[in-house]
Image: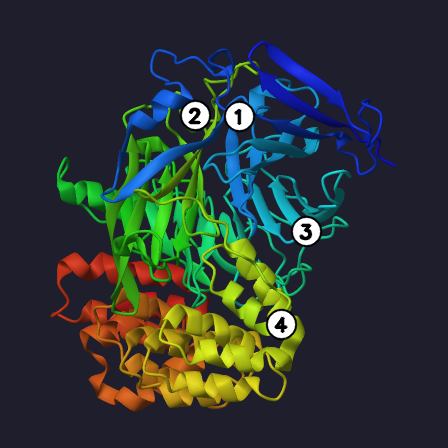
Amino acid sequence: MHAVSVVVYDIAGKGYTRFRSKAGPDNGGTDQNGGGTTSVQFLVFTEPPPARLLKPGGATGLSPADSVGALTMADGLTATLWASEPMFCNPTDIDIDAQGRVWVDEGLNYRQWQHNRPAGDRIVVLDDSTGGGKADRIRVFYQGTDVNAALGICVLGDQVIVSDSPNVFRFTDNGPDKPPTKELMFTGISGVQHDHGMHTFVFGPDGKLYFNFGNAGEHIKDKDGKPIIDVDGNEVNNTGHPYRQGMVFRCNPDGSEFEVLAHNFRNNYEVNVDSFGTIWQSDNDDDGNRGTRINYVMEHGNFGYTDEMTGAGWGQGKMAKYPNAAPGSDENWLDRIARHWHQYDPGVVPNLLNTGAGSPTGILVYEGDLLPAIFRNQLIHCEPGSNVVRAYTLTNDGAGYKAGIVNIMKSKDSWFRPSDVCVAPDGSLIVADWFDPGVGGHQMGDNDPNTAGGRLYRVAPTGSTAVAPKLDLSSAAGATAALASPNLATRYLAWTKLHELGAQAEGELVKMWKGSNPRMRARALWLLSKLPEKGAAYIAEAARDADSDIRITALRAASEIKLDIIPLVKDLVKDPSPQVRRECALRLRHSASMEAAGLWSELAIGHDGKDRWYLEALGIGADKNEDAFFSAWLAKVGDAWDTPAGRDIVWRSRSNKALPYLVKILKDAKTPSSEQQHYMRSFDFHSGPAKEEALKSLLE
């Protein structure tokens, strides 16, 4: 049993007034799960806290009060200080529950400062109990050396998932008067106390958990220490069989049906999923290349941090010299970034956006309506290296996307290091500030345990006051209303209740499905698709919808419930939207259907020779069926294969039957000498006698 202490501090002008609680003796206790000492504390702050308790401003670091004035905000938005030291410090990651409370992972015991706090780092819960617009109460949810500098926290009702390599813990919140229960969810992850290890979990609209680790993660095991085998039968590790470097994962809430959704990232710090099931994240380059990127995570894609076949870095071997651009030119810089991410290789998904130098951290998709229109349905991202929180304004671009950059908040204070951003139930943002003179490199300048800083800002339209929306899960109508929340923790509770109600919730969900907001319609569709004996009909209806994002959601929902995908692809194979056809191609991956090759060839004919997103979707869709799919395409196009689009397909294909066509391209007098290396590179992704014969024929 845990011995529990509940301590209340009233910060008065002359010090602390301490009250012993009836909950038990004030002597701490031993965590039976191996976590060290656990205590439950509440700090109640009078307004305002005495200045002597605030961290004094340093040479560049400002006090909490002054830090707000250093912020430059987007038009129409205001930032207010919601919480700061001494309530907490060094926030590595945050989440916001359905009550609007902010849960914070602290990182005072970061790397070489492991003994800053001998009892271990804390997970704290901050609350605005009076509605005054700032936190006035803090609860220590858990403390222990096993959560030192945790990099992820996800609150799902009374379940709290904490990511701290080598472990992922699932805590159960037993209320404020009892310590939480703790169990292992995953373990065996490398990158202990490394920023490139395991990051946070998020709840997807399909009811699954999404998460990732950077390239220090290396591998992952179940709670019993056994290697995870994913749904494709692969052991999940970075040895190149088949996965490399950082990865994105998906699984059921109980950890089953584990999938590797994409791989070959460097430090994909956090992942997020929109209502259609589209996955987004950032990735940090090898420092100093100005090559930080934003990714649309195309399912099962290779994202090119290292050579797919050899694992070599971008500066090694032939990639160090391929292709060439004028030294010092903009083309040379862009060429360097492209080589860094192996963008010239067949089988690498393109980058959505290059954001220059940086150290990207938390990211989300804002699907609320409180913020100005320019930020709605866009990515919002923390970039501590540049002291800024910004939005990426997305537009469709062929089978992929393009994006612009709009700043939300930027500080003149170089100590402003935004580590995470989350959406509160009222649609406002809470931004966590790690607060430090530097970022990255496993360093921490603000490391004095007595004065270490950290801030939380509320970002909302000017004049907006914090509101706690009422949450009613007692009925299908109330739960459906909660499903429309911009706050993920609220949507989790709503989704869980509606899924439990099943057919009893159908009527209310249909009202949302028949609405005008595509994202709300998609949220309803995910749940309707799971109704026994009715789900397939809703998916078929969605596949005929006028909105291409709804048609994409239909394909994804069909895969989720393991519906036969072939009839849907047949209906959509000539869809006017290249994004829908992209999704059709991805759904054919590993298909055993006799019709799959013919459908893939129809999709391949739809390639325009200019869209790399579409080409890579075709390549992913052909995995393990390369020869059959390539042959079906050749049978359809015949001698008309030799077009820019046809040459693309030959270059990207892993089929042995593509090799003679590579030779034809290379021997063709019409092929410019500048493209010879491009087509020769394709040979590196083939092996065996067919490759040897093709290379010999080049010499004839």
* Image spot of residue 177 (x, y percent): 76, 38
Left or right of 579 in this view: 446: right
Disc 1 to disc 2, C-alpha distance = 9 Å
Q: Which residue is mark 2?
A: 435
The disc placed on residue 89 is 1
Of the two numbered discs 2 and 3 on the same chain, state the one appearing first in sequence. 3
Of the two numbered discs 4 and 1 on the same chain, state the one appearing first in sequence. 1
Q: Are marks 2 and 4 in contact (CB under 8 Å)?
A: no
Choose between 532 and 11: the one closer to the eye.
11
237 is higher (above) or lower (below) than 494? above
Disc 1 to disc 3, C-alpha distance = 24 Å
225 is higher (above) or lower (below) than 20? below
* Image spot of residue 576 (x, y percent): 27, 82
Disc 4 to disc 1, C-alpha distance = 38 Å
**Amino acid at circle 1:** Cys
Q: Which residue is mark 3?
A: 158
**Amino acid at circle 2:** Phe
Q: Which residue is mark 4?
A: 499
> Residue at point 33% right, 62% down?
682
Disc 2 to disc 3, C-alpha distance = 30 Å
Q: Are marks 1 and 2 in contact (CB under 8 Å)?
A: yes
Q: Are marks 4 and 1 in contact (CB under 8 Å)?
A: no
